[in-house]
Image (cartoon, grey):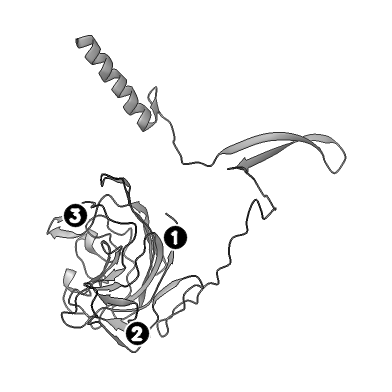
Amino acid sequence: MTAKRFSGMWVLALGALAVLGLVCGRAQAQFDSPVEKKWTVQEKDDNGEVKDVLYMSLDGVLVHEEDPAKAPQPRVVTPGTPSTQAQPGTAPSDAVVLFDGKDLANWSAEDGEKTKWVVENGVMQPTKDSGMIRSKGEYGSCQLHVEFQTPAPPEGEGQGRGNSGVFLMGQYEVQVLDSFENTTYPDGQAGALYGRKPPLVNACLKPGEWQCYDIVFHRPVFDESGKVVKRATFTIFHNGVLIQDHYDLSGGNGWVGPHAVTDYVAHGDKGPIMLQDHGNPVRFRNIWLRELAD
């Protein structure tokens, strides 16, 4: 009985090592690679000499294939224009424009009713006790562009100064905060994945200056039992500076206490973009996204 139990444990251990890609104490790299094939063909060169020429295909498509039926050309997207402090830019031609300074037609209150947020001089902002605002459309993996401006002159300190948030799928928060010469816990400062991951650097501009987040988000995937089988990932540029580098989000990041955030909870493939009313008059402009494949 003991020998059989030990044998079973040894088999299980070998299985675990195989999952980890460990063989004879050495790590074996495992990649989601294309199917790569290589072969040689005898061809004449410019001098008429016959030589072996290496050919290679990736997932059945020849490297440098020119036949559009086999290697279609990428679709054309017209880039938008960059923003300045005085003027918001424009979105790429294939973007879903959520806010262009005109109205809140694409937004509602968290409960789906009319929002109490307002538009003034081409920017949107919360009013007293207006609550969260959410996009009427729902999205999964995406490239999201958001511009924001924290109040000037600044008031308060720490989490009480220029606080808001950008929520992907209505629940994964990228913190908005006036972190210019304003200290707080690192995983709650501007650009943090709230409670989970501080930004790599502090790239904040002064209060009153327009700032932007460019976020590349890939949604999490859950199995039928509700277990996460693929974590959400975030790449974020703050004012053009990389602050989150393809980070695997280890769980949810909703606030549940002074020193705790939520775990992953299974949800659908799409959810709204949401902006937080945290009692500070943070203003927003030029919000758009491009939907991405998972």
N-term-proximal mark, 2 vs 3: 2
* Residue type at numbered disc 1: Leu
Task: Please say if the residues under marks 1 and 3 sit with CB atoms less than 8 Å apart.
Answer: no
Q: CA distance from mark 1 to mark 3?
A: 26 Å
Q: Quadrant of residue 176?
A: bottom left
In the rendered structure, find residue 152 and report the number of the disc placed on it.
none
Mark 3 Cα-neighbour bin, 10 Å: few <14, some 14–19, many ≥20 = some
In the rendered structure, find residue 103 and report the number of the disc placed on it.
2
Residue picked out by circle 3: 262
* Residue type at numbered disc 3: Thr
Q: Quadrant of the C terminus?
A: bottom left
Residue picked out by circle 1: 292
Mark 2 Cα-neighbour bin, 10 Å: few <14, some 14–19, many ≥20 = some
Q: Is residue 149 visible?
A: no
Q: Is residue 108 left or right of residue 287?
A: left
Q: Quadrant of the N terminus?
A: top left
Horizontal and vertical percent position of residue 70 = 65, 50
Horizontal and vertical percent position of residue 159 = 18, 69
Horizontal and vertical percent position of residue 198 = 27, 58
* Residue type at numbered disc 2: Asp
